[in-house]
Every structure is written in structure tokens, then in C-alpha cells.
Amino acid sequence: RGDNDTTSRPVATLSKMSAVASATASRVVLRSSFVGAQRKPVSRLPGARSNGTAVKTSASWNPFAQNSNKAGIVGSQGRDDYESEDVEYYFNYMGILADEGSNDRMDALLAADKHPIDVILLFAAAEGDVPKIEEILEAGADVNVTDLDGKTPLELAGKNNPEKKASVEAMLKAKM
């Protein structure tokens, strides 16, 4: 082969590079300025790596809970903790703002000095949102609030979700 023929050189160069990379990789030392409490993990996944540190956490979330009391979320907010911003968050969460005219109704109720928690109750009752109704009733929502047409949550119960009407009515009547 001639001097200009390089067909065998890339293989030789590749094997030399692999050897250099392996040698270099074995010399790398990772250091960290984090100094945490060294604790033995209670349990580890097979094959999982650990740096020996432990983190202590706690949570009281139960995804199988049937209501907000069992889920541990009741009492996190009181009546005065709700703001008009919470009404908009609820509307976005429920997809109510996508309904034509609902944004105007929301704004009109808030402009009419309806308390934000009561505005949420009016819409949650119509939507049949039992967990939300339970949460806001515990927080102090007024079951006697009226919308701009003079309708109460009891009259609106299950309007957009007829299967939930009876349970919404029962919850509201229990608070009257």
C-alpha cells in the first residue's frame, strides 16, 4: 500500500483512542461540596446507586380517599383566604372558561361583590363538583348566596351534571 492509503489507519487510531479514553475515564474523580448526613438507607432498589445520604420527608396524600376530609385537604384554607384569583384558577381547572359567556359571568359575580368562595360554590354546584363543594363548605362558603339571576347553589345543583344533582343537594341541605 502507498503512503497515501489511510484505510488501515482509522482502525489503529480508533483502538488507540479507546485505550486513551479508558485510561482517562479511570482517572476521573468526582468531588462534591455537599456534605449531608450519612445514613444507611432503609431499603434500596436492586442495582440502585447511592451516595449514602438520606432525606427525610413526610406527606399526607391519599389518592384513594373518597372525599376531601379523607384526603387531608380540608381546613387548609378559610373563607378569607380565597381571592378572585382562586375563582379563575377553579374556572381554568374545570374548563369552565371555555364555555361561552362564562368568563363574563365570573367577572360580573365578582364585580357584584360576591365573595370569591361563594362564586366558586355557585359554579361547583352547577358542575356537580362534590369534592370542591365539600372543601369550600368546610372553609365557610355561604350556601344561601345567589347568582345574578337570584338562584342559590341548591337551585343550580347538578345543572351541568345531572348524575350529581342528588349528592350536591344533600351536601347543601346539610349545611343549611
Image: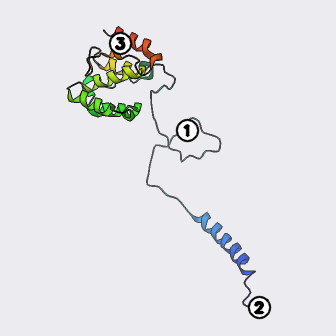
Is the residue 104 above or below the residue 155 in the image?
Answer: below
Among numbered discs 3 and 1, the one appearing first in the sequence:
1
Q: Amino acid at mark 2?
A: Gly
Q: Can residue 54 be seen?
A: yes
Furthest toward the right, the residue is 1
Q: Which mark is residue 72?
A: none
Query: Circle 1 sits on which residue?
Result: 41
Closer to the camera: disc 3 or disc 1? Answer: 3
Q: Nearer the viewer, residue 129 or 12?
A: 129
Q: Amino acid at mark 1?
A: Pro
Query: Circle 2 sits on which residue?
Result: 2
Per the model, the C-alpha gap separating discs 3 and 2 is: 94 Å
Among numbered discs 3 and 2, the one appearing first in the sequence:
2
Q: Nearer the viewer, residue 84 or 97?
A: 97
Element at label 3: helix
Residue at 56 percent of width and 63 percent of height: 28
Q: Can residue 74 be seen?
A: no
Q: Nearer the viewer, residue 44 or 79?
A: 79
Residue at 24 percent of width and 29 percent of height: 108
Element at label 1: loop
Closer to the camera: disc 3 or disc 2? Answer: 3
Residue 65 in percent (x, y) is at 49, 21
The residue carrying pointer 3 sits among few (fewer than 14), some (14 to 19) or many (20 or more) residues within 10 Å by Cα, namely: some
Q: Which mark is residue 172?
A: 3
Closer to the camera: disc 2 or disc 1? Answer: 2
Element at label 2: loop
Asked if residue 76 lies left or right of residue 17, the reply is left
Residue 84 in percent (x, y) is at 26, 32
Picture quadrant where residue 90 is located = top left
User: Which quadrant: the N terminus?
Assistant: bottom right
